[in-house]
Image (cartoon, rainbow, N blue to C red):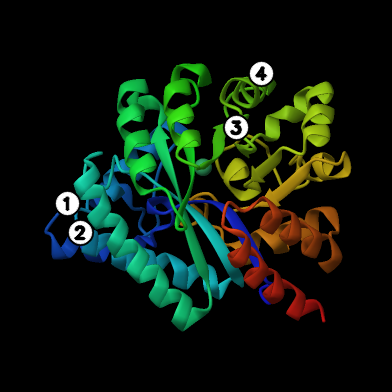
Amino acid sequence: MTDLPKVELHLHLEGAAPPAFIRGLAKEKKADIGGIFDERGNYKYKDFWDFLKVYEAATSVLTSPEDYARLTLAVLEESAASGVVYSETFLSPDFCGGRDVGAWREYLHAMREAADRAERDMGITLRGIITCIRHFGPDKARETALCAAETAGDWIVGFGIAGDEKVGKPRDYLWSFDCAREAGLRLTAHAGEWGGPDSVRDAVRDLGVERIGHGVRAIEDLALVDELAEKGIVLEVCPGSNIALGIYPGWRQHPIGELHRRGVRVTISTDDPPFFHTTMAREYDRLNAAFDWDEGVFDGIARTSLDAAFCDGDTRERIRKKLEARNA
Ligand SMILES: [Zn+2]
């Protein structure tokens, strides 16, 4: 399945950092973060909340625009090796300059330059979605939204919210989402991963998002599943992430099969791939094994993903040709 051209919509840039890259950077900076790795050099954590801590420790060695440029290249190299031709990544001004617009612009410039280089060298296209961090609270989210509004355009194309779903309610972040929407950004929100169906309903109703990060727990309420299908809300499903964090016991028990069967627009992503020992190619392989999905199903999902991408129309058509070239 590595050869199939893939479109990924849900990828946290720091969460995609290869452990060897983070270790190398820590060594250069003489930062002691050895405790976050296991004996094989992979990230080590106990549960989701511990994962958030390890994530922040790993991210702490990324301190300059140059670091983020190198990170962008390292991540895109991994994605391209899995057959990804278009990717949207979550970026947080919280980690890039502490939500200061001037500093954020410098980080963004560095990442964009790296992404342009990757596009030339590896044929993979990247766009950015700015996310506020839910457990940092609504006030910091406002500052993040202002960074997003200031830099919205043909590369920063969306706004969202990530972090601990158990903190606060989607409507607490309404000001930030309205600010981003007015700046022309498209909207997505993490919901229905740790929260149940109501969290998905709240995000759709209160924030007016067109995509939901995860959203898989909608399956616990079939009326909601029908509503998502009817409204054409797209779910950014990350099965390997859900299984690694223990939300579902295994691939066959993962609801993506049932959601797809019931007409919900599902897409496939890796979330924070090295943390969950996954890649896009591995997600495809596992889904193929669990649900007997053939290339036709995956082609359909790649098209759904591209239709739901937040990029401009010209970029979409350019990527569409890549998907079609494979099927010609
Ligand atoms: Zn996520």
Name the residue carrying label 2: 26
Q: Nearer the viewer, mark 4 or mark 1?
A: 4
User: Residue 327: horizontal and vertical position, in percent?
Assistant: 81, 77
Q: Which mark is residue 281?
A: none
Q: Nearer the viewer, mark 1 or mark 2?
A: 2
Give the distance between the C-alpha atoms of the residues marked 4 and 1, in whole angstroms: 41 Å
Residue type marked 2: Ala
Is residue 82 shown left or right of residue 54? right
Q: Residues within 10 Å of mark 3 (few under 14, many from 20)?
A: many
Asked whether the beta carbons under mark 4 and mark 3 sit within 8 Å of each other, the answer is no
Residue type marked 1: Asp
Name the residue carrying label 4: 198
User: Residue 146: horizontal and vertical position, in percent?
Assistant: 33, 35
Determine whether the residue tagged by mark 1 lies in a helix, strand or loop. loop
Q: Is the distance from the Cβ of mark 3 to the nearest ligand 1 atom less than 8 Å?
A: yes
Mark 1 or 2 closer to N-term?
Answer: 2
Vertical order, 15 against 254 (above or below)? below
Task: Look at the image and tell me whether residue 4 can be seen.
Answer: no
Residue type marked 3: Glu
Asked whether the beta carbons under mark 3 and mark 2 sit within 8 Å of each other, the answer is no
